[in-house]
């Protein structure tokens, strides 16, 4: 069994909450923040299970910037989350 860490960014679009995992470029949604986070856990688990079944999990994680540390996969370190604007 392997542990795979990931980051969840949760935001609101209209009346829907969206949970996004940038390391894996996966998202899911729900009517509440809790629902969105539950749904993203299910989406990540499904992604990991299907990737492992195809024998592609390690390659996908390495391409996403993960590093293996014993039985754990550590995601790339985020150093900042900024909100920027552009004027056109």
Image (cartoon, rainbow, N blue to C red):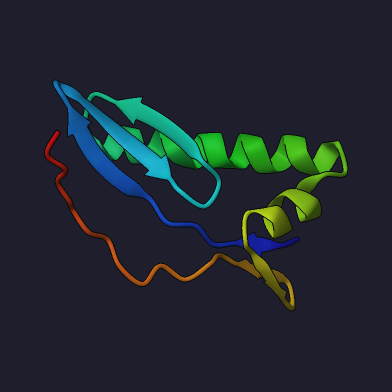
Q: Residue furthest right?
A: 55
Instruction: Provide residue 25's location: percent of width, then percent of height.
Output: 51, 41
Tell whether 18 sits left or right of 12. Answer: right
Q: Going by the image, does 29 lie left or right of 4?
A: left
Q: Residue at x 54, y 62 (%)?
A: 5
Quadrant of the rendered image containing residue 79: bottom left
- What residue occupies the far front of the structure in this picture? 88
In the displayed structure, would residue 23 be above or below residue 42?
Answer: below
**Which is nearer the eye, 87 or 24?**
87
Residue name at image x 39 percent, y 41 percent:
20
Indicate the position of residue 38 as horizontal and vertical percent values: 39, 38
Q: Quadrant of residue 86?
A: top left
Residue at image location 14% in from the left, 46% down from the top:
85
- The residue nearer to you, when weighing 79 against 27, is 79
Labels in figure, total: 0
Image height check: is 13 above or below 62? Answer: above
Q: Nearer the viewer, residue 85 or 12?
A: 85
Image quadrant for the N terminus? bottom right
**For residue 41, above or below residue 17:** below
Residue at the extreme bottom: 70
- Where is residue 18 shown, x and y percent of the image? 30, 33
What is the x, y in percent for residue 40?
44, 38
**Quadrant, the C terminus:** top left
């Amino acid at each position: 069994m392997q542990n795979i860490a990931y980051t969840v960014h949760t935001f609101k679009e209209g009346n829907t909450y969206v949970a996004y995992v940038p390391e894996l470029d996966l998202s899911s949604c729900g009517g509440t923040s809790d629902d969105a986070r539950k749904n993203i856990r299910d989406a990540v688990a499904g992604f990991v299970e299907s990737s492992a079944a195809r024998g592609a999990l390690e390659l996908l994680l390495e391409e996403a910037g993960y590093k293996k540390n014993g039985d754990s996969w550590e995601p790339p370190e985020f150093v900042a989350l900024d909100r920027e604007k552009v004027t056109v």
